[in-house]
Amino acid sequence: MKILFATQNQHKRDEVQALVGHQFNILSLHDLHFTAELPETHETLQENALEKALFVHQQFSIDCFSEDTGLEIDALGGAPGVYSARYAGAGKKPQDNVAKVLQELGDNDNRNAHFRTVICLFYHNETQYFEGIVNGTIAKEPAGEKGFGYDPIFIPEGTALTFAQMNASEKNDISHRRIAIDKMILWLNQQVG
Ligand code: IMP
């Protein structure tokens, strides 16, 4: 089954394709040569996920899903959260966002955080939501070259490595996106029997 993932982020598309296996063919906006930036104008992950899915559904009229992810840090009152992509300001690089998190946290001993992903699926004109959360801590300094975004400073619970020190399959085994995608695949499988 072909399903469109409403994202411009090829890292995310590749992660999701690896998660769902051959049963689903995940198309990205890149595959459809659609380069417009997706709107993200709301204050919750759920509303942003809906906005992106709706926007893309209106363009292509095919089943699609979108996801919005935030890094939520306890000592920062849940920041950067829904503002994770532009925490250091619009147009800044992922490294700038990472640097801002480390600066805001300083020597704070409470480094508890979680990644939260919300998926919004448009399937046969119905909307479904799926959530995935992974708990962890924020490292004192960036480590690792793999992954993307905040991966170099996020140490998931039960490991000593940052996501960026893991290979793709190790991250995919435990990630927030994995948890949310598994829920979506389970639901889709129930629909197609
Ligand atoms: P968005 O969901 O694409 O808006 O992503 C929000 C922000 O979180 C961006 O800065 C991403 O780089 C970052 N982000 C999303 N997913 C991950 C992840 O799995 N690891 C690290 N950073 C992520």
Image (spheres, grey):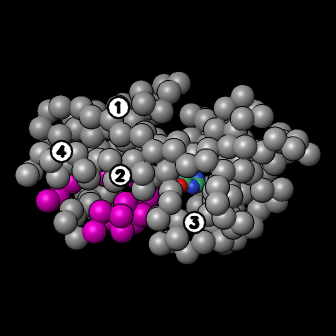
The residue segment tinted magenta is 1-21
Which of these two is toward me, 95 or 120? 120
Residue positioned most to the front: 158
Tell me if 8 is positioned left or right of 187 in this view: right
> Which tag, 3 or 2, sits closer to the chain's start?
3
Q: Amino acid at mark 4?
A: Asp
Residue 147: numbered disc: 3
> Which tag, 4 or 3, sits closer to the chain's start?
4
> Label 2 near label 4: C-beta < 8 Å?
no
The residue at 31%/57% (across/down) is 28
The residue at 25%/50% (across/down) is 186
Tell me if 183 is positioned left or right of 111 in this view: left
Whether residue 4 can be seen here = no
* Residue at numbered disc 4: 63
Tell me if 126 is positioned left or right of 44 in this view: left
Place residue 131 in its image quadrant: top left
Q: CA distance from mark 4 to mark 3?
A: 28 Å
> Label 2 near label 1: C-beta < 8 Å?
no
Residue positioned most to the left: 193
Q: Is residue 26 magenta?
A: no
Q: Position of residue 122 (x, y in %)?
A: 22, 38
Badge nearest the viewer, 1 or 2: 2
Q: Position of residue 58 (x, y in %)?
A: 21, 35
> Which tag, 1 or 3, sits closer to the chain's start?
1
Q: Position of residue 91 (x, y in %)?
A: 63, 45
Q: Position of residue 149 (x, y in %)?
A: 61, 55
Badge nearest the viewer, 3 or 2: 2
| Mark 1 surroundings within 10 Å by alpha-carbon count, few (fewer than 14), some (14 through 19), many (20 or more) | many
* Residue at numbered disc 2: 181
